Image (cartoon, helix red, strand yellow):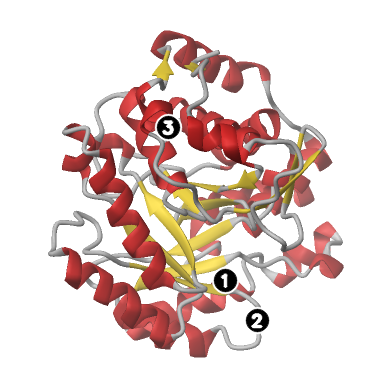
Amino acid sequence: MPVDRNHPGPAHEMMAKPGHQPHTSPSIAILAGRPLQPNSGIPLDMNWIQEVRVNTSAVERRAQSQVARRTVKKEWQAAWLLRAISCMDLTTLSGDDTDERVRRLCAKARQPVQPDLVHKLRVEELDVKVAAVCVYHVFVETALHALEGSGIHVAAVSTGFPAGLSPLAERVAEIRRSVEAGAHEIDVVITRALVFGGRWQALYDEIAAFKQACGTAHMKVILAAGDLLTLRNVARASVVAMMAGADFIKTSTGKEPTNATLPVGLVMTRAIREYAQQTGMAVGFKAAGGIRTAKQSTDWLAMMKEELGQSWMRAELFRFGASGLLGDIERQLEHHATGRYSAEYRHPLA
């Protein structure tokens, strides 16, 4: 096992007692036949964190074999690609964003696949649309109006995205402003220096403060894995974020030199699995940054299925943070329907 922790600490031993139910709400996932509840967090368990180990070479071998031995073809590929679309956070986070660009992105979110292609694929009844549109706080209201009645969520990046280095009070206030504006989901960034210094209590307190400010909005905790230097740091930060109440843990801001990679994803999903086994609570996973091809999307979906099961192959527990990915998926679907690849300009994003 690439992630190894053999001796449970007191907090998660308590949470894992037979019959313990951390929530009274309906289960949101099944793992190994066990119903799981939404994550409400647990007290910080330093024993658990200190005992986290990652076998880097084993993780890299597993990730390589994932790509080499898993593929889907023909109608199965089309089905997986449609599933990938339904798990997308369609994203625009550029310095030159405008209200009009966000409105165009929202129009694409409502109808991510062109109507003639939907007809050729005979999937009209699926009503395919993305899970969310992710924007800066200033565009939350614009996105809400553009998506009204669609059921598509609006996600706002917050907490001084992407660096996360503004004062804590300002970052918490930014979350509250986005929630008050109507954002359904908040993507927050952690202070990376707390990971480097092993200041796990401070990291836990920071994320817990973010969670409290989110209220009923779902919180996705961005670890910025490309900045964390080691897979062990990624694993430990994942555990702390889940203990502090994260609804999702997310790989990257998309602004780091290295973003979502399968080895990082493997470490994070196995941390999610272990947390679920110990606590009875499910945490979602978001892969963001550098995922641009249809083949990559099926690789990530295959990893979710093999590591966590079918419960995590849906928008409630899995997301792609994507902008360019949708265009390549549309081209692959066009090839499946017609036998020809269409030009990229026929599938504009925004």
- Badge 1 amino acid: Ala
Neighbor class of circle 1 (other Cα within 10 Å; few <14, some 14-19, many 20+) is: many
Nearest to the observer: residue 247 or residue 285: 247
Q: Secondary structure at mark 2?
A: loop
| Residue under label 1 | 109
Mark 1 near mark 2, Cβ–Cβ under 8 Å? yes
Is 51 situated left or right of 166 in this image? Answer: right
* Residue 150, label in figure: 2
Neighbor class of circle 3 (other Cα within 10 Å; few <14, some 14-19, many 20+) is: many
Quadrant of residue 109 within the rendered picture: bottom right
Is 85 situated left or right of 118 in this image? Answer: left
Give how far across and how far down residue 103 sits, in percent: 45, 82
Residue 170 visible in the snapshot: yes
Neighbor class of circle 2 (other Cα within 10 Å; few <14, some 14-19, many 20+) is: few
Seen at 16% across and 33% down, the residue is 197
Nearest to the observer: residue 89 or residue 264: 264
Q: Earlier in the sequence, mark 3 or mark 1?
A: 1
Give the Cα distance between marks 3 and 2.
32 Å
| 126 is higher (above) or lower (below) than 315 | below
Q: Secondary structure at mark 1?
A: helix
Nearest to the observer: residue 98 or residue 327: 98
Is 234 situated left or right of 63 in this image? Answer: left
- Badge 2 amino acid: Ser
Give how far across and how far down residue 78 sits, in percent: 75, 46
Q: How many marks?
A: 3
Residue 300 visible in the snapshot: no
* Residue 261, label in figure: 3
- Badge 3 amino acid: Thr
Give how far across and how far down residue 107 sits, in percent: 55, 79
* Residue 86, label in figure: none
